[in-house]
Structure formats: C-alpha cells, structure tokens
Image (cartoon, grey):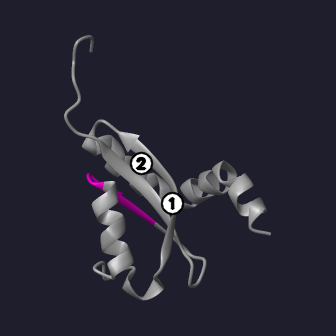
Amino acid sequence: MPGATTSSVFFVYVLESLLDGKRYIGFTKNLKKRLEEHQKGLSLSTKFRRPFKLIYFEACTNEEDARRREKYLKTTRGRRFLAKRLKSYYLSKL
C-alpha cells in the first residue's frame, strides 16, 4: 500500500550446528535476541547442539507469511529449496 509503514519485521532463519552439522529452522520477531538464546542454550530444541552458525534468513513484514514460510522450509520441498539456495555455501565447506 502506498504510504503504509511497517512497524514489525518477522524473521525465518536457518542455523547450522557446528557440533553435528544439522540444521535448525525457526521463526522470530527479534533475530539477534533469538540467536543469542540459541547460543546460550536457552532453547530446549537446540540446547545440546551448540554452537550454531546462522546460514540463512528471510524477513517478512507479515507474521502469518513468516510462519507459513517457516512451516514450508521444514517440509521436504522446503529443505530441497534450501539445499539449492545454499549450494555455494555447502560447496565451500568441502
């Protein structure tokens, strides 16, 4: 909409565990704070896979869109999308 301002941004993000190489996909309104929580072990789902590296994120101006995107990235098709999107990242690790 012309003249509309966005007061909120929502993030979908992908972390890679430096311990086991597995990815974690999440959603947050405050990306910096959420990454700190993961690194400090404050998230039960990632507590034992620390430390992490942020390898991908997307920003959305609508919370529903961000939640829908997070859900999609957790599907098989979404994981395939990420593999293609991050192809150069994974090739540089070889």
Residue 76, image quadrant: bottom right
| Label 1 Cα crowd, 10 Å radius (few <14 / some 14-19 / many 20+) | few
Question: Above or below — where is 10 with respect to 44?
Answer: above
Three-letter code for the amino acid on which mark 2 is drawn: Arg
- Element type where label 2 sits in the image: helix
Instruction: Judge left or right: residue 62 versus residue 48.
Output: left
Instruction: Judge left or right: residue 55 versus residue 84.
Output: left
Residue 7, image quadrant: top left
Residue 40, image quadrant: bottom left
Q: Is residue 29 magenta?
A: yes
Q: Disc 1 marks which residue? A: 75
Q: Main secondary structure of the magenta part?
A: strand
In the rendering, at what x and y percent does residue 24 appear?
47, 69
- Element type where label 1 sits in the image: loop
Question: Above or below — where is 62 with respect to 56?
Answer: above
| Label 2 Cα crowd, 10 Å radius (few <14 / some 14-19 / many 20+) | some
Question: Above or below — where is 35 with respect to 5?
Answer: below
In percent of the image, x 33 and y 69: which residue is there? 36
Q: Disc 2 marks which residue? A: 69
In percent of the image, x 56 and y 84: which residue is there? 19
Q: Is residue 50 magenta?
A: no
Mark number for residue 33? none
Q: Quadrant of the C terminus?
A: bottom right
Front one among 57 and 76: 57
In the rendering, at what x and y percent does residue 49 appear?
47, 84
In percent of the image, x 71 and y 62: which residue is there? 90
Residue placed furthest toward the bottom:
48
Residue range highlighted in magenta: 25-30
Three-letter code for the amino acid on which mark 1 is drawn: Thr
For the residues labelled 1 and 2, say whether their Cβ atoms are less than 8 Å apart: no
In the rendering, at what x and y percent does residue 1 appear?
27, 15
Quote the CA–CA distance across marks 1 and 2.
Answer: 10 Å
